[in-house]
Image (cartoon, rainbow, N blue to C red):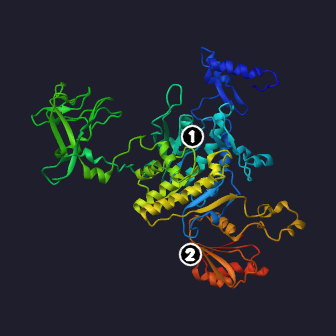
Amino acid sequence: MNKLDMETVNITDENIARIGQLFPNVIVESENGKSIDFDLLKQELSNEIVEGAKEKYQLTWPGKKEAILNANTPSQQTLRPIREKSVDFDNTQNIYIEGDNLEALKILQESYLNKIDFIYIDPPYNTGNDFIYNDRFAKDSNEELVESGQMDELGNRLITNNSSNGRFHSDWLSMIYPRLKLSRNLLSSKGIIFISIDDSELFNLKKICDEIFGENNFIGNVVRVAKTTSFRGNYFAPSKDYLLCYAKNISNVSQFNDEATNDNQFNKIEKDGPRKGEFYRDDIAFYLSTLETRPNQRYYIECPDGELVVPPGKTMPEKKEDASKAIPNNGDGVWRWEQKQYLLKKDLLVFKESSRTPLLNQDGNPAHWNIYTKSYLNDKKEKGNIPRDIFEGFLNRNGSEELSKMNIPFSFPKPSQLIKYLMKILNLDKNAYVLDFFSGSATTADALMQLNAEDNGDRKFILVQLPEKCDENSETFKNGYRNICEIGEERIRKAAKKIKEETNANIDYGFRVYKIDSSNMKDVYYKPNDLQQSQLALFESNIKDDRTTADLLTQVILDLGLTLDLKIEEKKILDNTVYYVDNNSLVACFDYNVDISIVDEICKCQPLKVVFKDNSFKYDNDKINLEEKFKKLSPETEVSIL
């Protein structure tokens, strides 16, 4: 049954649709939805160049400036620890953050600037039914939206981005842009990001990444075979997605290596020489074509009967007698080695007589020989292979099967083996930081723990996920999971248990859970000038009443640029609770009625930073004497008041 619109036809929309049928390229997205680019329409209807706005090569959309502003606007939100959800909170170095990933990335800026070695994200693909962040609503407060689950208590709103939306691409671009912009700051000098995506936004995402990371830092676009059986689609059955890969600085990135080697291919045994007894295979000695001129790689090689041969092509070396080189044209074959390398590695060549060789002799006729190079199994195992940019064996169903075995229902998880493989081909350092800020079912954490168990690594994960509510009619909800964070956290617990049982590896199986919340400080802390003198007496403390010392310590750690994985030790000094973070990196006390003599004990460890509350001390003049006391007993200590 159709619902009546009860209004007249929108003639403008119909006219735009008619023009779009003739000139689809002039339909653009604007603040008010779909509209016409009149300058472009004029050009389509003219036989001469029409003067208009100056042309630029760039990707732009309505809302781009706002997206840049969103990335640059500071946040007053903070993280609050949730010990009851955490596993081994006091000892673990892994972090799980519940909340809006834009705010999380802002909060992490100081503490993890230039520290993250590997980022993997699997953002919404914008297929027409995805939920995406709408950051324009982040400042609104709408009780009805909160109650319906469309917006959380902090004003973060998820919306379904339907393809009928006049800002369909623009809204998605405005969502992803500031998050990628902030993530680049976190990457280390050799850091790398992989982003899963499909055809819907691949080309827009590529342009955004070129702008944020730099086109010169583009490493590759990997095709992943996602399905081997697919029944959707009208023209092609969709079976793939992509992994865009960028570096922070490509000059600092080493060659990727795939350790997987098919031993069965190395079925020949060296009979003589220093490598006697080693297995090897014969590899073709030349490249069939080259997209760049390689003047040192097209030359004659002399065969056992004296015939001079060169790879197929039209450009021939001039001098036959000295096997001099020639500058190849595009499409000409070249040898694998430059001429100087060839002279050093001649012993690795294998000559085979052949009537079907693609090689040419010195007269430009088909040669009588084919040439191969010996490739030793031991070398391949040591150096690895460069991975192909088509990934097979990492199917969607593998990810679903993993969660099914854990009795966790979740739609479209990536297989953990995919992310583990990415970390392996990067030769990711054993103490690296790994970040996933669209963490979903926490596949990245599972993959990282698997890899650590394999090589006794100490890699640490930071996962961020909005606690998006589960549909009450879904299997997920029926199984007791109320939001996606509960799924991710339970997956980490179960994966850790499984890995420990199977490997008995001595690695970090825990994680600290934090949730994003408003600042621990009352408004008076940030805007004291907005209050009259008579009102200040109402604020005995500038800290919110519901906040704990653990909340305060977390915010201080972040504000001072320390990482969240540092060891925290609690001590009692003169009946006061004192926190020691990473031994002497930070010492903090948030008690009231603190005796100034506590400084004598604290200074014994020569702390780098010390923090007290504004009203911690018994007497007002103690605050004045505090800094002088530290200058005397621990002059290098930086003293702060909260």
State the residue at coordinates (53%, 58%).
Answer: 494
Amino acid carrying label 1: it is Ile
Classify 515 as above or below 13.
Answer: below
Amino acid carrying label 2: it is Asn
Q: Is residue 552 left or right of residue 618?
A: left
Classify 261 as above or below 293.
Answer: below
Q: Quadrant of the C terminus?
A: bottom right
Displayed quadrant of residue 307:
top left
Displayed quadrant of residue 168:
top right
Closer-to-camera residue (512/407): 407
Residue 208 badge: 1
Residue 296, image x and y in percent? 26, 38
Residue 277, image x and y in percent? 17, 53
State the residue at coordinates (73%, 53%).
Answer: 154
Residue 32, image x and y in percent? 73, 32
State the residue at coordinates (72%, 45%).
Answer: 150
- Residue tagged 2: 583
Disc with the residue nearer the chain's start (1 vs 2) = 1
